[in-house]
Image: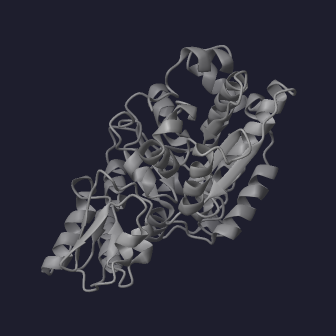
Amino acid sequence: MTFNELHRTVLKSKKDNTPLPRNLTDREQHQLDCLLHPDEHPLVWKTDACDCQDGSCAAACTFAALEIKDGQISFDPEKCTGCAKCIEACQNENLTFSHDSVKALELLKDDAHPVYALMAPAFIGQFGKDATPSRIRTALKQIGFTGMIEVAAFADILTLKEALEFQHNMEQPDAFQLTSCCCPIWINLIRKDFGKIVGHLPASVSPMIACGRIAKQLHKGCRTIFIGPCLAKKAEAKEPELAGAIDCVLTFEELDYIFDTFSVDFSKLKDEVKEHSAAAGRLYARTGGVSQAVMECVKNINPDCQIDPVCENGIANCKKLLEDILNGKASGNFFEGMACDGGCVGGPKRVIPAQEGTQLVNDYAAQAPYRTPAENPYVIDLIHRLGFFTIEEFLKNSDILTRSL
């Protein structure tokens, strides 16, 4: 049986509480163990033995996390960021990633704790034309989630944080600011290879971590499952300083498997609109979105503050931009990088093409009832529930959105 067939079989067994498959080959038994115990295995692992000599997988890795000896590859988990370039480069499709779908179903079966789905901004259109945000929320509740939270609402809060920090930083001559906190590969690239400019990064967590931390503060004892197109989020959630905010990370592809296992038909679900995010946070899903959101916020705070954004996407382009910044060759004062082509909509485990995802994200942002974070009543209510009167007071006196660099 292929790995995908085994994956679907195990999901159905977990859903129906039936015995797991038996009489497996050694290869299938290893794959089963990886599905049942993802935290005990690397972020990227082999579904079968290597039988090629071209080394394309190792050559594709920007972070030198793969090594080939005697035709076999080994992974360095300390260097692997989850960019998925090795998986895409493997000609024999023998590489896959840590699957957490079984772990997610086990969390959903634990009635002792509420479980919230934290949905990445790139989710629009990923599950078909009938899968509207409200129908996705309904479907998630049907399979056991307590509710769905749009991470874009927390991108809204971080947008204001970055805008305020940018205004403060620009008081210094020749100042510039690096973003985007939402892309862990971009952050790791700066931290590992461009340490001289790491001080220009805001000490901000990603919207995913912010959402998880705040959800756990407001809903004591809850479990959080982040859902997005990105493998690197699986690694980010386990970073020692950030661990605990997110209990499990699913890709859109994994959630699509789960929806299929539960025979979800979105066309038959109720469609009740709930607006939680502003246009600013929704735009985080595509390249240039963070810059646009922060730029609009800066203009609202201080129209005289000049912001000149430069945006790049794709690891090679991001690396070139950072080299230019380091060598004083880059123009601009606000630099955004996203490792995937097109931004998060081009993530390795998206379901739809990046170009289609970009258009849908733009449309969803245009439909938002609020343009900026400061206009979003859901964000204001969150701040009040956390014990603060204003967003500014929250950003100044709470460390829930910060991390060390």
Q: Is residue 88 above or below residue 125?
A: below
Could you tell me which residue is drawn at 70 percent across and 30 percent down? 174
Q: Is 226 displayed left or right of 284 in the figure?
A: left
Q: Is 354 displayed left or right of 225 in the figure?
A: right
Taking depth in this image into account, of 251 and 261 the one nearest to the observer is 251
Residue 41, position in %: x, y? 23, 58
- Residue found at the far right of this picture: 303
Could you tell me which residue is drawn at 32 percent across and 38 percent down? 112
Residue 398, position in %: x, y? 53, 18
Image quarter of the C terminus: top left
Task: Specify the quadrant of the image occupied by residue 155.
Answer: top right
Is residue 272 visible to the viewer in this orientation of the structure?
A: no
Residue 197, position in %: x, y? 53, 37
Taking depth in this image into account, of 147 and 177 the one nearest to the observer is 177
Q: Is 59 displayed left or right of 190 in the figure?
A: left
Residue 73, position in %: x, y? 24, 72
Is residue 121 visible to the viewer in this orientation of the structure?
A: yes
Task: Specify the quadrant of the image occupied by residue 224.
Answer: top left
Q: Is residue 255 above or below residue 186?
A: below
Could you tell me which residue is drawn at 56 percent across and 69 percent down? 351
Taking depth in this image into account, of 402 and 52 the one nearest to the observer is 52
Task: Specify the quadrant of the image occupied by residue 334.
Answer: top right
